[in-house]
Structure formats: structure tokens, C-alpha cells
Image: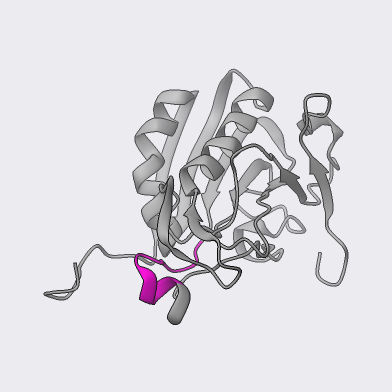
């Protein structure tokens, strides 16, 4: 909730941050998976995804928005992407205070975005950040960590499964949709891509 410190959990060999340990009222928890996950810049590299506990047989995987950094100019000169963890406020589909919300009963895995690569990059760039270290874009590793956590914690057979995202996250949702739909079993599923259209001006590619 706004103005309150968010709970967090750091995954290790001995701590797996299980869903059952999270607040049953859906208060969000930041899960830090460690490993090869990270944000784009070395001054705040630690990555986390955000979990709202709900029913184990209802899952929403939501890819966060945050622009795109595709070259040196858009990354280090005029940064065009989100570069650190930005906690999702309890608004819209994330508002658990009203039971009439369509996803009020869902467990939500919010795939945070701080890699500037539309959630699919896995590369070390030749150009450097302000600390003189190579830019690393590990959106694929970040999303994969969140997905594997969901596979380990949600029901084997889901009643309802939704993959969604906004802006850059809408691209991520579309790029990950097939993999996710193949990874889970479900009775009904949907993919929602909000606020993005795949049209680019001539010469922008």
C-alpha cells in the first residue's frame, strides 16, 4: 500500500519464498531471485518481481511497462527506459480492496522491468554505464525467474490463466505468450496486450 514499506524475500538455496508464506490478504511481496537476474545499470543491479497472493488456481502474469533502451544513445546519453525496480502501486487491476475487480482473487506475478529490452534480452553490450562497467540487459533471465517461481508455487492445473502487459510490457506479454501458454495447464486462458501498436516510422529500425 502507499506509504508503507513493501515486504521482501530473497531467494537462496535454503529460502524459496513460497506463496504460502506470503500475506493471505494479497499484500504484495518483492521476491529477489538472485542468480543471473539484474537491472541494466551496475549502480542498482538487484532485480525483483512482485507477487500478490491469491487463489492457487488463478494466475495473472503481468509484464511491467518502462520504455526501451536499444543502443548507446538511448541507454547512456538519453536514457529511454526504466533502469531500476519501480514498485507497482495498488491501483487498477492491482487493487485488492474491491471484490468486484476481475482479478481480485488471482495470484498476480508482476514481472518488474528494469532491463530496457522488452523483457527478452540476454546480452552484455560494448558500451559502458556511469561506473565504467558494461551495460547488461537480462530481461529474459528476469522474466524466466518469475515464471519458474510461478510454476513452482501455483496449482498444476489452473482454472484461469491470464498473460498481460502495458506498453513495453505489452510487447513482452506477446513475446512470452506462447512459452507461458505451453508451460502451464489451464481450463481457460487469455492474453491482453495494452497500449502498444507495432508500427514504426520509416528509418527508425
Colouring scheme, one of rainbow, by chain, secondary structure, one colour: one colour
| Drawn side of residue 101 relative to residue 166, left or right | right
Q: Is residue 79 visible?
A: no
User: In the image as oriented, which residue stretches furthest toward the front?
Assistant: 132
Question: In this orientation, which residue lies closer to the viewer: 5 or 57?
Answer: 5
Q: Quadrant of the C terminus?
A: bottom left
Q: Quadrant of residue 1 in the image?
A: bottom right
Query: Is 71 covered by the magenta stretch?
Result: yes
Residue 152 image point, x, y percent = 65, 23
Residue 199 image point, x, y percent = 20, 67
Q: Quadrant of residue 10 in the image?
A: top right
Q: Residue at x 55, y 44 (%)?
A: 142
Instruction: Count every numbered label the image shows and give the total.
Output: 0
Q: Quadrant of residue 107 in the image?
A: top right
| Drawn side of residue 63 relative to residue 126, left or right | right
- Magenta segment's dominant SS is loop
Residue 108 image point, x, y percent = 64, 45
The residue segment tinted magenta is 65-75
Q: Is residue 29 visible?
A: yes
Residue 112 image point, x, y percent = 59, 54
User: In the image as oriented, which residue stretches furthest toward the top?
Assistant: 156
User: In the image as oriented, which residue stretches furthest toward the left?
Assistant: 202
- State whether residue 83 is above or below residue 177: below
Question: In this orientation, which residue lies closer to the viewer: 87 or 91?
Answer: 87
Q: Residue at x 73, y 58 (%)?
A: 98
Query: Is 80 covered by the magenta stretch?
Result: no
Q: Residue at x 35, y 45 (%)?
A: 175
Question: In this orientation, which residue lies closer to the viewer: 115 or 153?
Answer: 115
| Drawn side of residue 62 relative to residue 169, left or right | right
Amino acid at each position: 500500500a502507499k506509504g508503507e514499506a513493501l515486504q521482501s524475500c530473497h531467494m537462496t538455496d535454503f529460502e524459496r519464498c513460497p506463496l504460502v508464506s506470503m500475506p493471505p490478504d494479497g499484500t504484495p511481496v518483492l521476491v529477489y531471485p538472485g542468480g543471473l537476474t539484474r537491472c541494466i545499470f551496475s549502480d542498482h543491479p538487484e532485480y525483483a518481481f512482485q507477487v500478490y497472493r491469491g487463489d492457487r488456481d488463478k494466475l495473472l502474469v503481468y509484464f511491467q511497462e518502462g520504455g526501451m533502451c536499444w543502443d548507446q544513445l538511448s541507454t547512456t546519453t538519453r536514457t529511454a527506459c526504466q533502469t531500476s525496480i519501480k514498485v507497482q502501486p495498488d491501483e487498477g487491476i492491482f487493487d485488492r480492496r474491491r471484490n468486484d475487480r476481475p482479478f481480485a482473487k488471482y495470484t498476480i506475478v508482476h514481472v518488474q522491468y528494469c532491463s530496457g529490452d522488452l523483457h527478452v534480452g540476454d546480452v552484455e553490450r560494448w558500451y559502458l554505464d556511469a561506473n565504467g562497467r558494461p551495460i547488461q540487459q537480462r530481461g529474459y533471465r528476469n522474466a524466466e525467474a518469475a515464471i519458474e517461481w510461478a510454476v513452482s508455487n501455483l496449482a498444476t492445473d489452473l482454472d484461469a490463466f491470464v498473460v498481460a502487459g502495458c506498453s513495453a510490457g505489452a510487447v513482452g506479454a506477446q513475446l512470452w505468450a506462447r512459452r507461458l501458454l505451453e508451460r502451464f495447464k489451464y481450463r481457460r486462458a487469455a492474453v491482453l496486450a495494452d497500449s502498444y501498436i507495432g508500427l514504426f516510422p520509416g528509418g527508425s529500425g
